[in-house]
Amino acid sequence: MSDYFFAAYQILYEQIIRPLIFRSSAQDAHRRMLRLLTWLDRSPLLCGLLVRLRRLITKSHYVRTGGVTLRSPLILAAGLVKGEGFADETDALVAVAGGRNIMPGWRSMPALAGLVEFGSFTRHPRLGNPGEVVWRDEAARSTQNRIGLKNPGARVAAAFLARHRHDLPAQFGINVAASPGVTDPEQETAEVLEAFGAFIEQGIRPAWFTLNLSCPNTEDDPTGRQTEDQTRRLCGAVVTLLRAKQVNTPLWVKISPGLAAEQYGILMRVFHEVGVRGVIATNTLSRPTPTDSVLTAGVGGGRLHQHALEAARCLAQEKAHYGYAVDIIGCGGALDGDTAQAFLSSGAAAVQYWSALIYRGPLAAAVIERELERGRTACAGRPHPAGS
Ligand SMILES: Cc1cc2nc3c(=O)[nH]c(=O)nc-3n(C[C@H](O)[C@H](O)[C@H](O)COP(=O)(O)O)c2cc1C
């Protein structure tokens, strides 16, 4: 039955729905997707049916990584379920108190995709960048964005999730980003701690927390927070906070592609020393936008894949060589079974995806998991080389 289901789904999405979506700009399609998610979020009944459908077509495949046992090796990466942008925290809190859904997809995306990382959330709300901020490169199955950390702010996001605490998925992640533009180290650390503290105070306990040290779309230096000193200060402070509050949620960190091998080595050592349990490799790759070569935006999908894979391999080598207790979560161009498997074969135990949602549709995780499963079965069926 599931063979027929997947065949029909792939024809429906890839040959009918996706061409229709791609008739409009990536920006318009993104806006429409968020509107659809808001509409779906309204119906617990419909979302419950989506959960049932997902369970029917996917097998539970538990993986232990980053200090947590996940129900699936595939996670929807940060950046979709993150909420509206606001200029002011009070306005955003009023919207939450008034019952408005300020976080499109909070109920429907986990129903459709399973594991989801919410965020990134910064300490204060952000409106993000104006104008055209999302593009796609269909031939390369890539996305590009300079959304600029648009989000309602950590305190408001925490209040919103607390309001819906009984309807939150069993497992999800929360991604917090350091505040762009804050250069004073003390203020930077204080704001990161306040952001994590907001979720802790509201009793929100995700399966993992992520600290996003790599924000290529905010005109900050994309590698600025990934120096040894800053990484040690920020990660160390968050781990200390979690321990002090007796929260045993593991901390993961998200880093950039394209760093020098030596820098990845330093980062892995720091993560191990301060108690970070997972590293997401990677965020997007900063490149000029298709419409204005002076502006840069983060590339995801096919054009990112090799860069992200190189980063993951480099981190995995460091882990193997020094025995670091830090797991690698691959991210970047995991669009099908082969590209997801490339991360798993490189030493990652789990994989995050974003662009696959655009190119493989709302059931991307189920489709990729199935392709992974088929790849494993094909490998198992192959004769072993002589002598092995
Ligand atoms: C529209 C958009 C918004 C994103 N926003 C965030 C974000 O807020 N925080 C973050 O850590 N990553 C963000 N990302 C990056 C993704 O989480 C992911 O790391 C990246 O797209 C690479 O994965 P992919 O190749 O599967 O797309 C965003 C990506 C896209 C396309």
Image: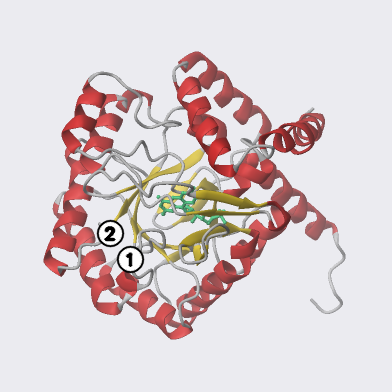
SS for tag 2? loop
- Pointers 2 and 1 in contact (C-beta within 8 Å): yes
Three-letter amino acid code at disc 2? Pro
> How is the model colour-coded?
secondary structure
SS for tag 1? loop
Three-letter amino acid code at disc 1? Asp
Q: Is residue 271 left or right of residue 239?
A: right
Percent across and percent down for residue 76 are 51, 45
Q: Is residue 351 left or right of residue 262?
A: right
Percent across and percent down for residue 110 are 49, 34
- Is residue 246 visible to the viewer in this orientation of the structure? no
Image quarter hosting the N terminus: top right
Closest to the observer, 104 or 57: 104
Closest to the observer, 208 or 105: 105
Mark 2 lies on residue:
180
Image quarter hosting the C terminus: bottom right
Mark 1 lies on residue:
220
Percent across and percent down for residue 340 are 64, 57
Q: Toward which corner of the image does residue 85 lie, by quadrant? A: top left
Please name the residue shown 35% across and 36% down the image: 84
